[in-house]
Amino acid sequence: MQFRGMIGRTRGAGRALLGISLLLGASAAVAQSASAPENILPAPAPVPAQPVSPATQAPVAVPTDPAAIALPPAPAIDPVMTWSLANAEALAGVIEQIGKHGLVPADYQLADLRAAILAGPGGALDAQASRSFTWLVEDMRDGRTRMDARHQWFVVDPDVEASPTETVMAQALASGDIAGAIEALAPTHPDYAVLKATLAATPAANKTTRNLLRVNLDRWRWMPRDLGKAYLLTNVPEFQLRLTVDNEIIRSYRTIVGKPGRTATPQLAEVVEGVIFNPTWTVPQSIVKGEGLGAQLLANPARATRENYKVTKAKDGTIYVVQQPGPKNALGMMKLDMPNEHAIFLHDTPGRHLFNQAARALSHGCIRTERALELAITMGILGGGLSKEEAVEIVKSGEYTRVPMTRTFPVYLTYFTMASDISGKLGQFNDLYGRDAPVLAALNAPRQPWDGKRKSTEAIIQLDNPL
């Protein structure tokens, strides 16, 4: 089957050439010069990169109490509006066909709606049609699976603010286009259409495949409907990262993701705020104190020098260990600064041989990226306004340098077990963390009312160990 890639296969030679021109062979860019790629985003005033002294860099405090993280209000529950028989009949027709999205007509009280239509216009029809429409909007816009079954899902979907239920209903009733109002809530990402088409072509007897399709269709509804013009997306079970423009893959990179269990990579939607070249690594206290590294290095200065650590002891006795920039740094030659409460980020690694393994769930949660220096330079150019020559000079300096993003660059850490791979072919990926079963169970159980939860309420685990 010929399907578009998860971010969309490159459709034209011009875009393909752009992708190649971004940094063809950028891992060798430090030693070579080439023309800078076409600027694909609006050009704001450049912000110069500033070297920062990393020697005594202290850990950054992040909030760990979910209650301290402000979330937008939950959607309004069951607005009631006046429904004509024609609009109610149109709604019933939409519900009858909702299986094409992997949803179940009975969830939206189709029989009760039909009975209310037969009884004629009035308060009973208004209440039932409004209820059925509201539930359908919620599931198409926000996902049918409630948050308790979305393990480690910390993506807050903004679509409820963009398309409030009451607004959607009012516009649908005014236009009479009930079907169009519901379809307009579906994800715009090309993979959603691919999964939908595959579901339509899969025989009812093939329940295993159909269930997998339903699970992953719903996962797309948990995401923002529109991911943006330019973004990074990694599908954790596929071990791949994509740099994307207009839903087309510009570059792809193999990744190493979190081991199953406590160090599994959570699902996030963050924003890259800067690219850090020649990063330092502030060793977490779980290693400095918990594993005794601080005391060992203080007792063995030669080892500290050999392993490029700077060790300081505060007046209160706390030992701080910061690994200085260099090719053996645990973060490699770069990291993407994307502040979040989990301390998860994308970074390089000195253990690049591990990218040759087929199964790469090996990290403590962060995403290690192959050809990371190429990615960093590309991000510095496209998102930070650097010229290629400036980026190369920063790398060659060997100094800790943070290049702030002057353009918004979202990054999505997703989890799809059926999706288009980077070649554009639909495939199945190993359910690394066992997250399909609770989603399928939720989809097969009676629909639960919207509970107002916008992200997982599981405990935040700071996964800040790149080793």
Image: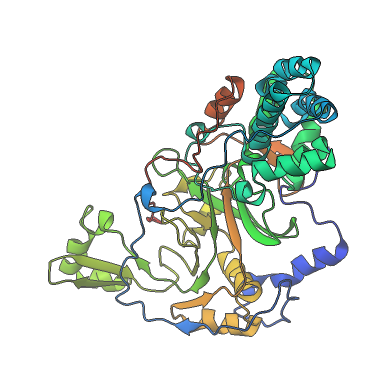
Residue nearest the observer in this picture, 262 or 197: 197
- Residue at image position (53%, 75%) is 404
Q: Position of residue 199 (x, y in %)?
A: 77, 29
Q: Quadrant of residue 202?
A: top right
Q: Identify the image quadrant of the N terminus.
A: top right
Side (left or right) of 390 relative to 291: right
Residue 137 locus on image (x, y percent): 68, 36
Total of numbered circles in the picture?
A: 0
**Residue 240 seen in this snapshot:** no
Residue drawn 49% across and 74% down? Answer: 277
When asked about the image quadrant of residue 172, the answer is: top right
The reply to whether residue 358 is visible in this rendering is yes
Residue 244: x and y, percent? 70, 59
**Residue 317: x and y, percent?**
13, 66
State the image quarter where residue 169 is shown: top right
The residue shown at (41%, 38%) is 261
Q: What is the basis of the colouring in this image?
A: rainbow
Residue found 69% across the figure and 71% down from its top:
23
Residue at the outermost left position: 316
Q: Is residue 229 above or below residue 150?
A: below
